[in-house]
Amino acid sequence: MQEEVQKHTQKIYKTVKNSEHTLGEKVKEIIIEVFIIVFAVTLSIWLHSWSEHNHQQEEVAVFLGNLKNDLQNDIKNLNIEKQGYVESNMGYEKILALTPLQLDSIYKSKNKVSFPIYSHGQVMNIGNYEGFKSSGKIGYIENEKLKQKILNYYQISVPSISEVDKMYNNFLFKCFDKMIENADKSEEKLYSDPKFKKTVEFVIKLGKNNIRVYDQNVKPMAIELIKEIEKEMNK
């Protein structure tokens, strides 16, 4: 393209220097050459923009495909974590329901009370989103509605999962701390201790709250986002 512009620029220069042509002929030739240069430059810019736009949309398509897989895995992980909460809560409720007489009977028979341990770690898949966002490519998504849903999911819903799981783990670790503090005492006394029982009650409440957050807030958003992505990819 640069060579073409230089060639037509040289033609203009030669036209100006050509003493055989009249002024009118020179002006006419110059206008034609300038038009050719402007057209060539405009076409080049348009082709470059078109090519760049296509490349950007190809990147968006790959990103959305990966994001769909992440969301499907998020839903599976949420179901696994929810089941962990359900089973743990059942175990804690059984412990709270034990009377001093029942606890005494258990330990006299040399049995143990099983204390459920299910610490919740990283649940959501955020690698693809973080990579695309940090590279400044979120703006490539032209569907504004879809873009906002993606941002809301990863900036509101995903952090909410981390927060509620963190709160749950904190109270669970308080139970462990209490067990360590009372390591020299019998488990019968520990499970009868009002403070320990109150901590376990909070663990149960947090577990139920987290199930609600999973089922009513995050999972429906993930399902809706998958539908929006599929709709966009099928255009």
Image (cartoon, rainbow, N blue to C red):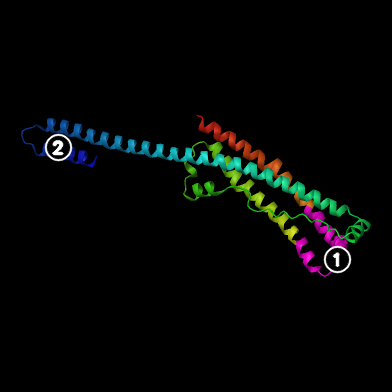
Q: Residue furthest bottom?
A: 184
**Contact check, label 2 and label 1, Cβ < 8 Å:** no
Q: What residue type is labelled 1?
A: Ser
Element under disc 2:
helix
Q: Can you say which quadrant of the picture contains the N terminus? A: top left
Residue 187 visible at all: yes
Q: Name which quarter of the figure residue 181 lies in.
A: bottom right
The residue positioned 67% from the left and 44% from the top of the image is 78
Asked if the magenta segment contains residue 177, the reply would be yes
Asked if residue 210 is positioned above or below residue 15 in the image, the reply reads: below
Element under disc 1:
loop
Circle 1 sits on which residue?
186
Circle 2 sits on which residue?
11
x then y, percent, for residue 86? 76, 46
In front here: 233 or 23? Answer: 233
Residue 71's disc is: none
Magenta region: 174-203
In front here: 145 or 95? Answer: 95
x then y, percent, for residue 101? 94, 57
Asked if residue 85 is positioned above or below residue 47 in the image, the reply reads: below
Q: Which amino acid does label 2 sit on?
A: Lys
Left/right of residue 83 with respect to residue 24 in the rendered view: right
Label 2 vs 1, first from the N-terminus: 2
